[in-house]
Image (cartoon, rainbow, N blue to C red):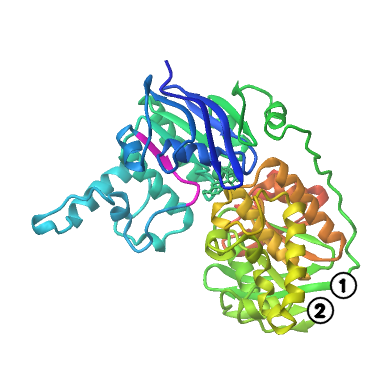
Amino acid sequence: MGLLTVQKVSKSFPGVRALQEVDFELKAGEVHALLGENGAGKSTLMKILAGIYQKDQGRILVDGQEVEISSPSHAKSLSIGIIHQELCLLPHLTVAQNIFLGREPRKWKGLLDEKAINDATHVLLAYLKLNLDPKKKLGSLTIAKQQLVEIAKVFSNVSKILIMDEPTATLNHTEVQDLFRIIQQLKSQGVGIIYISHKMDEIQQIADRITVLRDGRYIDTVPIDTPINRVIALMVGRDIETKTKTIPDTSHSPIKLKVENVSRGDWVKNVSFNLRKGEILGFAGLMGAGRTELARLVFGADKMDCGKIYIDDQVCTISSPVDAVKAGIAYLSEDRKRYGLATDLTVETNITLVHLAKWLRFKFWLLKTQLVEQSAKMVEKLGIKTPNLEQKVRFLSGGNQQKIVIAKWLLRDSDILIFDEPTRGIDVGAKAEIYQMLDMLAQMGKAIIVISSELPEVMLLSHRILVMCEGKITGEVPGEKATQEWIMSLATQRG
Ligand SMILES: Nc1ncnc2c1ncn2[C@@H]1O[C@H](COP(=O)(O)OP(=O)(O)OP(=O)(O)O)[C@@H](O)[C@H]1O
Ligand SMILES: [Mg+2]
């Protein structure tokens, strides 16, 4: 008998049939991967199990007993825990306060027993072998560390069923291994785990079985040794065009962006490079190597200690993102929630947001219709799954939100485009589309920087790769000769 059985569950939102008669079964002690394209309905199904949404139809059984999961606290009482795709911790509280939120030990007169929760958190973190300080304010940690706190929190609430919705999207290699170790511990205790991810190599490492959803429907459940191509075909229902690597000769194109001896504290140390028109320049390195920090300096989001930036051979003072946008630089941030999106505004407003200032100065209505047209085109081009342009962005699936960030900057028509982890959380099909788009933009003469932690991705996309380690550029690898070994040896070259 399964630990959890889902039978013919359906769920609709206004204009969207998110789930149609979906079946799913979870056994005790297994890691069951749930796969599907962006908007396939994975998170919706998980939110139903976690009591956040209510199903319209169908049955859910826990330990063979039919249940109506009416609220998150009800889900908790049924021993169902969830780690969300988007973080939902409180940044102004400490690590320990977040872990014990809602079940804090109280002292006399209801005062919080800080010492008790700090001690308990210390023990918990030590048990999980996580190197975190219980007393640190959560907001001061990196997104990845915050994610580990969330995982520790769920672990401490011991559940029978644990849902992980893209838990590794923001984690680096060692942190992923930390997580996998915790998952193994939970498995051996008989916990059933539902694991959602777009990273196929992870799935193969950690999962026992795979269930595939497509367009809100159940497609199939297959064992983990099913060939990867077969799994992808189940997910997308068609063959994906795989990008073939083409490297144009841009050695004679004009230099569009020149970065000279740029430094900031310990993060970026004396970095210089050129970027030519029509070139895709990749930045590889381990998490924390200084790639995002460098991009933020070029974009004026942080202030450099020293160094110069030239655009078209002219020295350019960029002291804020506004200056950067004026100078024709676009930056797609890796953290879409914090910098890229206004999730309470509509799809259309988000896509056209960077134009706002521009259209206010012109005839409002004329440009407005143009913008609506353009956003509609972008939504179609990128295959953004939304019932209409008036939908609030927070109602879109995670991957579709990422596509909106991309759409918005593409419309701005900048000459220099910096993509920081452009395909994070994006499904295999849409990834291929984004790769093609980058190629197309380069052919149009745009100068492009791609920062990516997925080595196969940087290698596939870049004409030339710069590798960073501890704030410095440690080497350059030509696109046609790039190997993982070469890049990794430069990425770990300290000193
Ligand atoms: N609260 C909501 N209101 C309206 N529509 C919603 C809501 N939540 C989800 N949807 C829609 O339901 C569909 C399924 O979304 P869901 O978040 O489950 O996808 P997903 O498989 O998790 O995708 P991703 O891989 O991008 O995270 C999408 O079309 C989404 O826009
Ligand atoms: Mg999702």
Across and down, in percent, residue 302 comes to: 56, 75
User: Residue at point 75% right, 81% down?
Assistant: 363
Which of pointers 1 and 2 lies earlier in the amino acid sequence?
1
Between 62 and 481, the one nearer to me in the picture: 62
Report how far apart the C-alphas of labels 1 and 2 lie in the structure: 8 Å
Name the residue at the top extreme: 1
Q: Residue flagged by tag 2: what amino acid is it?
A: Asp
User: Residue at point 36% right, 38% down?
Assistant: 70
Q: Report the residue marked by disc 2.
A: 312
Residue 365 seen: yes
Q: Report the residue marked by disc 1.
A: 254
- Is residue 361 covered in magenta? no
In the figure, is residue 386 to the left or right of 93? right
- Is residue 83 covered in magenta? yes
Residue range in magenta is 80-86
Q: Is residue 482 above or below residue 325?
A: above
Label 2 secondary element = loop
User: Residue at point 58% right, 57% down?
Assistant: 393
Residue 274 seen: no
Between 457 and 98, the one nearer to me in the picture: 98
Q: Residue flagged by tag 1: what amino acid is it?
A: Pro
Badge 2: residue crowd in 10 Å (few <14, some 14–19, many ≥20) = few
